[in-house]
Image (cartoon, rainbow, N blue to C red):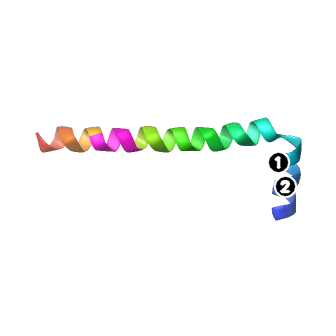
Amino acid sequence: MKRYVLTQWKAHKATVALIIFGFFVADLILSIGVTVSRRQFEY
């Protein structure tokens, strides 16, 4: 599995980087959404 991931990383660096970047962006957006909805619920 590790060898497969490393070969994919070498072959498709841009795709893997975009997937990782997208994961962090989605996590940030979800975190902001939870915070906003929690504040709306408190009012």
Taking the image as drawn, is residue 1 in sight? no
Taking the image as drawn, is residue 23 in sight? yes
- Residue 41 percent coordinates (x, y): 17, 42
- Residue 25 percent coordinates (x, y): 53, 38
Does residue 6 appear left or right of residue 15 in this picture?
right
Which residue corresponds to the image point at 85% horizontal and 48% vertical from the top-left?
A: 8
Does residue 38 appear left or right of residue 29 in this picture?
left
Q: Secondary structure at mark 1?
A: helix
The quadrant in which residue 36 appears is top left
**Mark 2 Cα shell of 10 Å, populated few (<14), some (14-19), many (≥20):** few
Q: Secondary structure at mark 2?
A: helix
- Residue 12 percent coordinates (x, y): 83, 40
Which residue corresponds to the image point at 45% horizontal and 41% vertical from the top-left?
A: 28
Looking at the rendering, the stretch of residues picked out in magenta corresponds to 31-35
Residue on which the image places disc 2: 6
Which residue corresponds to the image point at 82% horizontal and 48% vertical from the top-left?
A: 9
Q: Say whether residue 32 is magenta.
A: yes
Report the front residue among 28 and 40.
28
Does residue 13 appear left or right of residue 26 in this picture?
right
The C terminus appears in which quarter of the rendering? top left
Q: What amino acid is at disc 2?
A: Leu
Residue on which the image places disc 1: 9
Name the chief secondary structure element in magenta. Answer: helix
The N terminus appears in which quarter of the rendering? bottom right
Q: Are marks 1 and 2 in contact (CB under 8 Å)?
A: yes
Does residue 18 appear left or right of residue 33 in this picture?
right
**Mark 1 Cα shell of 10 Å, populated few (<14), some (14-19), many (≥20):** some
